[in-house]
Image (tube, rainbow, N blue to C red):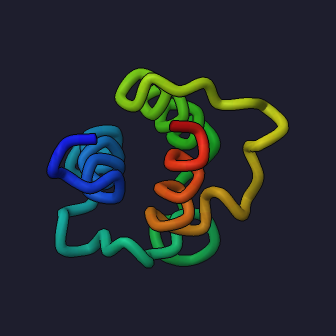
């Protein structure tokens, strides 16, 4: 892993996917992604999963894709780390 944390890389991916509708200051590592907070939809979730697979060279299992993984950037980062 590079010096940039997994959380920071995920934040950058998500900000890119949200195309300016959210700025960096609005997205903390503990900001809820689904319920409350950003309330990202299933299309953004799918695009984020695809981006995660490319960025981190991991394979996301369909069985792993649960709401608990998408709670916030920290839970996503923990998932990524478990796949590295």
Q: Residue at x 18, y 74 (%)?
A: 25
Above or below — where is 5 with respect to 82? below
Q: Nearer the viewer, residue 79 or 48?
A: 79
Image coords of residue 38 (percent x, y)? 46, 66
Q: Nearer the viewer, residue 75 or 26?
A: 75
Q: Nearer the viewer, residue 23 or 1?
A: 1
Above or below — where is 61 with respect to 67? above
Image coords of residue 79 (percent x, y)? 59, 51
Asked whether, in this view, residue 72 is left or right of residue 18, the answer is right
Residue farthest to the right, as pictured: 63
Q: Is residue 21 visible?
A: no
Quarter of image, res 83:
top right
Q: Residue at x 37, y 72 (%)?
A: 29
Q: How many tags in the picture? A: 0
Asked whether, in this view, residue 39 is left or right of residue 64, the answer is left
Q: Residue at x 71, y 64 (%)?
A: 68
Q: Is residue 29 visible?
A: yes
Image quadrant where one finds the N terminus? top left
Asked whether, in this view, residue 18 is left or right of residue 20, the answer is right
Image coords of residue 55 (percent x, y)? 35, 28
Image coords of residue 7 (percent x, y)? 34, 58
């Amino acid at each position: 892993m590079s010096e940039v944390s997994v959380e920071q890389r995920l934040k950058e991916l998500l900000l890119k996917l949200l195309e300016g509708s959210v700025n960096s200051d609005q997205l903390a590592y503990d900001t809820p992604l689904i319920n409350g907070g950003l309330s990202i939809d299933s299309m953004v979730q799918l695009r984020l999963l695809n981006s995660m697979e490319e960025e981190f060279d991991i394979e996301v299992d369909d069985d792993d894709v649960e709401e608990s993984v998408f709670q916030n950037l920290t839970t996503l980062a923990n998932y990524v780390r478990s796949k590295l």
